[in-house]
Structures are given as structure tokens and as C-alpha cells.
Amino acid sequence: MAEQATDRLVRMLGILTYVERHGDTPFTELAEHFGVTVDQVRADIDALWLASEPGDSWYPIDFSADAFDADVAALVRNDGVSQVRLSPREAVALVGALSTMGAAGALPEAGTQVLAKLREALAEPVIVLGDDAVDGRVRDALVDAIARYRQAEVAYVDALDRRTSRTVDPHRLVLIDGHAYLECYCRRAEDYRVLRLDRIEDVTVLDGAVEHPPTDSAGFTLTPAFTATVRIARAGRWALEDMPGVRIEDAEDDVIATFDVADDAWVAGRLLTVAPHLRSVSPRRLVDALHRQATAVLDVQR
């Protein structure tokens, strides 16, 4: 049976840990310890060496070329074992792979040690959604509120590190551009909002029932139609901070926001609330939608 990639990954991590702990180690000793051939050990070390060349995602790991030629593993530099940095998603994936091997009785001692350290690091109630590490208590409370159609009070920190308390009608948890969001109706804003889950510090499920249904527009679809760029005075920044996947840059007295648009009418309606602060809007499709929204408002007021 062909070797699984996760099996080899665990062994390679184990080889690095073993050599780091025991110093220069003959290939024969590594082969016996990990239950493989000397040729396989040589190939594993060669792969680690190549994968950690400068410019790649690994921190540099350098073996002695002379020792390698003599079938000895000798670390010259190692910033890849003791100081390895994993994203939450990578850590959870590795824990899953190691746990599966452990349940099958195929996990070497070094792998068991790596697994224990990873579990210790992930001991906090954190759930990985997309690229975000979300407090598990926050996620569970929102799931409960959505399932029972209950309002929720959320402690939220926006992009400017401002803390607010909002009462919301929670509707869905979604992933947009790799980030987890709560779709909801925010009573503070009196409008629909998408709030980043990793910016929600606390959730209290309330007794009151949800009163506002989910938006019937396509505003929260996960398939964008185009990318918009809006330059706006800082006073109007608040209207763009929770746009799904928004990227905001400072530009003198203004900010420039770039974000994907799924429903130009929905976005135009949001922009209209801060129209006096708008400096420029592109592309033309969004400008036309904004013009239609403004014309409709004027028609109603006549």
C-alpha cells in the first residue's frame, strides 16, 4: 500500500524533533527508530532540506552537507521545529491527522509529543471558521440563538478597535472570502449587517423573538459580481467597515475601501446613507445603481 502524505509528514516532523534532541544522528539509527529504510530517511531529509530553502513558507532548516554525504543527519540551523508557527486551520488539520494515526497505533513517539503540544495550544474553546479563530462560546451561542429564533446581544469590536454593544436578530453564519460572518439585523444601525465573528467578544442570547426576517435581496450571496472601489471621507467610513471582505486604506483625510459586490442595489443603498461623504465610486455599474437609488428617493420626496 502506498504511503499516505500525512504519514510521511508526521515522520519528517519526528525526524527533526529527534535530531534536535539527540544531536548528530546516523541514518541507520533514524531508520530503526521510525521503522523505515535508510533510503527513505535520506529522501525525507532531502525533502525537508529542499522545502526549507529561503523564500519558501518554512522557516529555514539547514543540514550539514558533509554529514549528509556520510549518512548522518546533522542540523546546522533549525528554526522549523521548536519555533514552528501554524495557522489555526493548519493546527487543527495536523491534530486530526496525528489523532487518526494515534488511534490506529501508528504514531511514533515524536508524533505523540507533537500532538500533545498542539492539543495544549488549542486547549482554549476556539473553533476555526475559514481563516479565523473564533471563540467557541461565541459560535455556540449564535447557533443556539439562530436555531431558537431568539435575539442576541453581542459585544463587538470594529475595525477601528471601537467596542459597542448591539442587539441583533441573528440569521446565518457564513464564510465570505475566507472569513466567518454573522448575517443579522442590527437594531443599533436599524439595518442589515454582516459582523465578523472573530470581532465578537461575547454573546448573550435574549428572550425576545427575532422580529426582522433575513434579507430577501441577494446582498449576502457568496458569489460576487464585481469589485468596487469607494473613496470616502473618514466620517463615512462606518458604513463600509462591515462590507464582506472589505479592505480599507488611509488616503490623507479620506479612506479608500475595496470590496466585492454581489448585489449593486443593496450596496448602493448603503452608500446613499453616507452620500455627502463620498468622493468617488467605481466601477460605472455601481455609480449607475447609486444614481437609480438617489433618483428613487427624490421621486418619493416630490
Image (cartoon, rainbow, N blue to C red):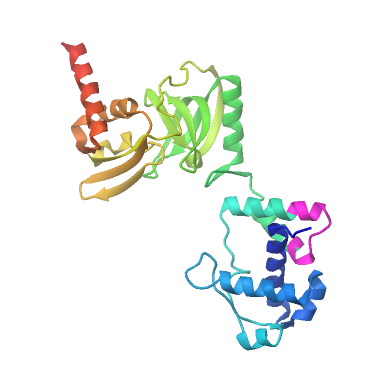
Up the image or down, 164 lies above or below 27; here it is above
Please say if 49 is above or below 70. Answer: above
Q: Is residue 139 magenta?
A: no
Residue 269: x and y, percent?
29, 25
Farthest residue, direction front: 1
Q: Quadrant of the N terminus?
A: bottom right
Residue in the picture at 72% in, 66% down: 11
Taking the spot 62% from the left edge, 54% from the top edge, the residue there is: 91
Residues in magenta, as a range: 99-112
Residue 200 x %, y %:
49, 38
Is 94 drawn above or below residue 17 in the view shown? above
As drawn, 20 above or below 2: below
Determine the residue positioned at 54% across, 33% down: 203
Question: Is residue 106 found inside the magenta-colored segment of the image?
Answer: yes
When asked about the image quadrant of residue 228, the answer is top left
Whether residue 256 can be seen here: yes
Residue 265 located left or right of residue 139:
left
- Side (left or right) of 77 relative to 4: left
User: Residue, x 58% and y 25% (percent of image)?
Assistant: 145
Give the x, y percent position of residue 7: 73, 60
Which residue occupies the foreground of this view, 13 or 191?
Answer: 13
On the rendered structure, is 9 left or right of 190?
right
Q: Is residue 79 visible?
A: no
